[in-house]
Image: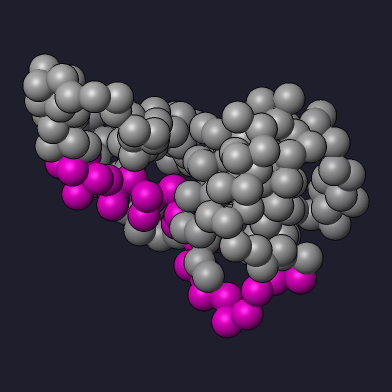
C-alpha cells in the first residue's frame, strides 16, 4: 500500500460516510479505522495525536479527517523534508508567471500547507463529479441516457488528467513515497464491497 491508498480512502469517506448519522455504521467504522491505521503508518500522527485520535466517536473521527484535509499533519514534518520535486515545481511556476514575487519572496512552509489544502478541496470536488453513477435507471429515456453519456465522456477526460494532482498531494503527505509491504497495525482487512452491499440491503 502507498500514501495514495490513504488519499483515496479519505476522499471516499468524506463523500459517502462522514455524516453523523452514518458514524456507527459498519462501512464507516471500518473505513475510518483504515484511515487512522494508514495515517499512523505513514507518520502523519505524532504520538500525542495517535492517543487523541484513538477514540471511535463522531467528533474524534471528524477531527481526524479535518487534521488530514487541512494539512495539520505537516506539524510533524519540516520544510527541509518537503519533497524536493514539490518545491521545484512551485518555484518554476512562480519564476515563469510571477518573476517579481519569485525573486522577492522565498518559498515558505506555509505555502506547502495552503497548496495541500486548496488542492485537496479541489480534488474532492473532482472525486464527487467523477464518482460512478449508482442505482438503475428506471425505464428508458433517450434524453437521460444521452445526457449520461456526455457526463461519462467528460469524466473520462478528467480521470485521465488527474494524475499530477494526486501525485502532488501524495508527495506532500509522504515525502518519502513509501510502499508498505504489509498491512499496518490496526488496519481492518475487510471486504468492503460485501459489507457495503449487506449494509445497504438492511438500511435502504
Q: Position of residue 150 (x, y in %)?
A: 12, 29
Q: Position of residue 124 (x, y in %)?
A: 44, 33
The residue at 44%/48% (across/down) is 169
177 up-or-down from 45: above or below: below
The colour scheme used here is one colour
The residue at 56%/47% (across/down) is 197
In the rendered image, the residue lying farthest to the front is 139
Residue placed most toward the observer, 68 or 104:
68
**Going by the image, does 142 lie left or right of 71?**
left
Res 141 → quadrant: top left
Q: Quadrant of the C terminus?
A: top right
Residue placed most toward the observer, 104 or 8:
8
Q: How many numbered callouts? A: 0
* 176 magenta-colored: yes
* 64 magenta-colored: no
**In the rendered image, is residue 173 in sight?**
no
**Going by the image, does 196 lie left or right of 60?**
left
**Going by the image, does 63 lie left or right of 182?**
right
Res 130 → quadrant: top left
Span highlighted in magenta in the image: 156-185
The residue at 70%/52% (across/down) is 30
**In the rendered image, is residue 127 in sight?**
yes
Residue placed most toward the observer, 175 or 163:
163
Q: Position of residue 114 (x, y in %)?
A: 49, 32
Amino acid at each position: 500500500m502507498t500514501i495514495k491508498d490513504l488519499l483515496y480512502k479519505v476522499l471516499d469517506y468524506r463523500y459517502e460516510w462522514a455524516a453523523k448519522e452514518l458514524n456507527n455504521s459498519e462501512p464507516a467504522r471500518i473505513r475510518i479505522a483504515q484511515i487512522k491505521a494508514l495515517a499512523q503508518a505513514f507518520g502523519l500522527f505524532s504520538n500525542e495525536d495517535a492517543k487523541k485520535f484513538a477514540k471511535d466517536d463522531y467528533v474524534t473521527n471528524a477531527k481526524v479527517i479535518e487534521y488530514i484535509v487541512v494539512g495539520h499533519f505537516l506539524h510533524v514534518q519540516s520544510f527541509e523534508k518537503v519533497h524536493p520535486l514539490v518545491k521545484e515545481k512551485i518555484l518554476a511556476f512562480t519564476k515563469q508567471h510571477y518573476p517579481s514575487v519569485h525573486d522577492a519572496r522565498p518559498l515558505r512552509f506555509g505555502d506547502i500547507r495552503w497548496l495541500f489544502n486548496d488542492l485537496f478541496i479541489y480534488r474532492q470536488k473532482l472525486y464527487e463529479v467523477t464518482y460512478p453513477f449508482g442505482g438503475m435507471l428506471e425505464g428508458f429515456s433517450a434524453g437521460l441516457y444521452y445526457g449520461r453519456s456526455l457526463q461519462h465522456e467528460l469524466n473520462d477526460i478528467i480521470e485521465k488528467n488527474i494524475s499530477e494532482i494526486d501525485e502532488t498531494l501524495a508527495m506532500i503527505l509522504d515525502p518519502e513515497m513509501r510502499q508498505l509491504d504489509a498491512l499496518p497495525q490496526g488496519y481492518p482487512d475487510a471486504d468492503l464491497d460485501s459489507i457495503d452491499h449487506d449494509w445497504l440491503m438492511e438500511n435502504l
